[in-house]
Amino acid sequence: MKKIMLPILILFLISGSAFSETTRKLVVNPDKSRVFTFCDAAGKEIAQELRDKDGNVTKTTGKIPDGVVKQYYKSGKVQAEWNYVGGKAEGKYKEYYESGKLQSEGVFKDGTMEGIKKWQTENEMLRYEYTFKTGIMIEKKSFYQSGKLWTEGTLKDGKEVFRKSYHEDGKLQEECPIVNGQRDGICKSYYKDGRYEECPFINGKQEGLAKIYSNPNKVKINMEEEFKNGLLNGIQRIYGVDGNVQKEFHFKDGKQLD
């Protein structure tokens, strides 16, 4: 009798686990806010979670059961999975390509992103890395196909305020203040041949006098260029090794006049 009851008990536990699964469906609104609908194994709606465009929860209705919550592609393959505790996402979460390979992974704490989120290509190359603190992104990085660091941005109140980029050999390529996603301020560029440039930007376009030096200590100047609205406008001066002007060219709207 015991031998018969044991398989039945195992079958019951497996079936109970399968039928207790909670799934999550997503609808993205025109304003980029999101509506997550939670359903039980029978497909009955049991809860909803509203998030703003930044991913912050603004309203929850119903009760989200503790445990694993999954989201599926139309094909039936797992798209993402989270763990919920007390109605909030808690711990590691993962997103998958439809092929089943990992796309991204991160950590939730008390319903908000916390720590590092990684995103990789389908052939498992790391491309982006984001750092969150209490649900707000404070740093973001992108990587070359080789896996080496390409760019890193510093964020304040969820907006990028400073960005650095690197040559693939790891040496600094550019550093620049960012306003509303655009270069805005004095950008510094470091060329592979050792030259160094300072160029003012406004709203993502070069504006004002740019200077190129033989190296970052700015002892010897190589060139000066005047920009307006992202185009060469004015005089371009080329300097000799003695520090004197060797050549001058005049530009208007990006076209050389002489």
Image: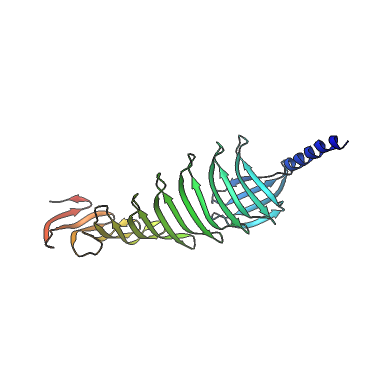
How many numbered dots are placed on residues in this image? Answer: 0
Quick one: 40 or 83, which is closer to the camera?
A: 83
Q: Residue furthest right?
A: 1
Q: Is residue 17 above or below residue 224?
A: above
> Which residue sits at x=71%, y=44%?
21
* Residue 102, placed above or below residue 203: above
Between residues 127 and 176, which one lies in front from this camera angle? 127
Query: In this view of the protein, can residue 249 be seen by the observer?
Result: yes
- Whether residue 211 is visible here, answered yes or no, is no
Residue 86 position in % (x across, y down): 70, 57
Residue 50: x and y in percent read 62, 53
**Left or right of residue 101: residue 240:** left
Rendered location of residue 79, percent (x, y): 59, 42
- Classify residue 150 as left or right of residue 129: left
Q: Residue at x 57, y 45 (%)?
A: 95
User: Is residue 152 shown left or right of residue 33?
Assistant: left
Q: Nearer the viewer, residue 93 or 209?
A: 93
Q: Which residue is depicted at the point 48% across and 39% down?
A: 123
Residue 69: give x, y in percent of width and height: 66, 47
| Quadrant location, the N terminus | top right
Q: Residue at x 67, y 51 (%)?
A: 48
- Please name whichever residue, 156 or 215, is drawn nearer the observer in this view of the structure: 215
Residue 123, compared with residue 63, is above or below; it is above
Give the image's coloring scheme.
rainbow
